[in-house]
């Protein structure tokens, strides 16, 4: 099978589908990977800085330029200055990085942008932190310096700090700059993390998965300089901001589904239970059956969202999106399909029994006015929750089987 990318030698000659030799694969300690798309005005500066810094520090290293389809001569310039060029057909920042890292021969990878906004002369500082035992070394522009004109005001004072706070909240990270483009990491950690993002979310996925894996993470101050592109950047403020938020939520099913679902379910159950004895008053405001109906709707909607959250967590576990979910793994192995069916059947029986009792009362009254509407709402709620529990249990089991994760198929032997 042909490789999806090819490598240029520093001499500038292209060898399709070339693979690093076994001898070379052990000769480098550090690989600097630079994604590139039409960066002819700055790629030479980046390559020279990286190679010079590694050489002066006595670090055996290489520079890989992962080219994403440049048409401005960036490939030839990079090769002429001593970089190894990897051609990446699949477009996207993440795709370029993944291809470059796949070809990297070093045990420690340093990545940075090709527009000279990060100073590759600082590469040895990242290597030093790795040698101290850190698996992921992140640059922090806010702890360092952001030069005038290097970052839009909205990104500096709102966008990046907000994304960082959300990342820390949703994923229990403790970092100060989520999107710094210069960072270093061991190749062993990268392979364990199994990063799949094709675009800019690569940076977030790395932090999320490293945190889940319990990797040792640190940050060092770096300086962000105005880029040397001479053209508008690829970033789009609102579009990319939404992509980042969406990605972080998709990797946090507890926050996206379970917590809102539980809150809505408890609110609905509280309203139904509170109004079951009769009308209530809050000051001069009377609260009665209409609010009780809304409570029923809230409880059912909350239960449905909780079910979707459980589906999402099972899928994440089966696809290895979520790392180290010990409590979820225990739950998946010990909670059986039959237990969900028994719970659902019990709730349905409870609801049906109550509904039969109300019907008997109504028949006994000669089908006159129905005075037990509250009971109808109350018992109907339990009946419908039972139906949800039964079908959700079946789907959870099917989802596990389809993904090779046999939910509730625990073998005690």
Image: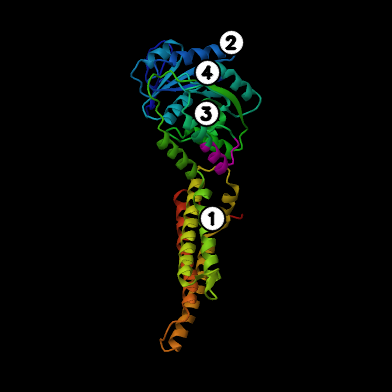
Q: Secondary structure at mark 3?
A: loop
Residue behind mark 2: 56
Nearest the camera: 111 or 405?
Answer: 111
Bounds of the magenta span? Answer: 162-174
How far apart in space, not on screen, are marks 3 and 1 (Cα)? 43 Å
Among numbered discs 1 and 4, the one appearing first in the sequence:
4
Tag nearer the camera, 2 or 3: 3
For the C terminus, which image quadrant? bottom right
Q: Secondary structure at mark 2?
A: helix
Residue behind mark 3: 180
Nearest the camera: 335 or 36?
Answer: 36
Residue behind mark 4: 119
Residue situated furthest front in the rendering = 284
Q: Secondary structure at mark 4?
A: loop
* Residue 173 percent across, percent down from the top left: 59, 38
Residue under the point 59% across and 41% down: 172
How far apart in space, not on screen, are marks 3 and 4 (Cα)? 12 Å
Residue under the point 52% across and 61% down: 265
The reply to whether the C-beta atoms of the residues labelled 3 and 4 are less than 8 Å apart is: no
Residue 247, above or below 274: above
How far apart in space, not on screen, are marks 1 and 4 (Cα)? 53 Å
Badge 1: residue crowd in 10 Å (few <14, some 14–19, many ≥20): some
* Residue 60 percent across, percent down from the top left: 57, 15
């Amino acid at each position: 099978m042909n490789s999806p990318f090819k490598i240029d030698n520093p001499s500038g000659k292209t060898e399709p589908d070339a693979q690093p030799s076994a001898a070379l694969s052990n000769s480098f300690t550090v690989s600097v990977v630079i994604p590139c798309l039409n960066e002819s005005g700055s790629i030479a500066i980046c390559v020279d800085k990286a190679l010079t810094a590694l050489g002066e520090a006595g670090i055996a290293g290489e520079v890989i330029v992962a080219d994403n389809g440049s048409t401005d001569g960036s490939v030839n310039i990079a090769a002429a200055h001593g970089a190894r060029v990897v051609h990446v057909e699949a477009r996207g920042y993440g795709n370029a990085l993944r291809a470059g890292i796949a070809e990297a021969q070093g045990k420690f990878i340093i990545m940075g942008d090709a527009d000279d906004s990060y100073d590759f002369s600082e590469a040895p500082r990242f290597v030093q932190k790795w040698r101290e035992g850190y698996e992921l070394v992140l640059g922090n522009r806010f702890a360092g310096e952001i030069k005038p004109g290097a970052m839009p005001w909205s990104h500096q004072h709102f966008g990046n700090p907000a994304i960082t706070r959300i990342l820390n909240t949703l994923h229990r990270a403790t970092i100060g700059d989520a999107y710094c483009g210069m960072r270093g990491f061991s190749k062993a950690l990268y392979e364990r993390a199994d990063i799949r993002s094709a675009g800019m979310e690569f940076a977030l996925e790395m932090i999320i998965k490293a945190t889940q894996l319990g990797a040792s993470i640190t940050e060092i101050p770096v300086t962000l300089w105005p880029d040397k592109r001479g053209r508008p950047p690829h970033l789009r403020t609102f579009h990319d901001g939404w992509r980042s938020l969406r990605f972080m939520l998709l990797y946090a099913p507890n926050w996206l589904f379970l917590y809102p679902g539980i809150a809505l379910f408890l609110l609905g159950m509280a309203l139904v239970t509170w109004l079951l004895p009769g009308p209530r008053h809050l000051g001069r405001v009377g609260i009665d059956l209409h609010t009780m109906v809304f409570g029923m709707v809230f409880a059912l909607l909350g239960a449905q969202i909780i079910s979707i959250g459980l589906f999402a967590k099972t899928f994440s576990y089966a696809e290895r999106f979520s790392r180290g979910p010990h409590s979820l793994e225990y739950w998946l192995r010990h909670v059986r399909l039959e237990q969900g069916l028994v719970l659902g059947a019990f709730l349905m029986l409870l609801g049906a029994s109550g509904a039969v009792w109300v019907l008997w009362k109504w028949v006994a009254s000669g089908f006159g006015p129905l005075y037990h509407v509250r009971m109808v709402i109350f018992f109907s709620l339990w009946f419908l929750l039972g139906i949800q529990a039964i079908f959700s249990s079946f789907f959870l089991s099917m989802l596990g089987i389809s993904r090779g994760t046999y939910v509730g198929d625990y073998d005690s032997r």
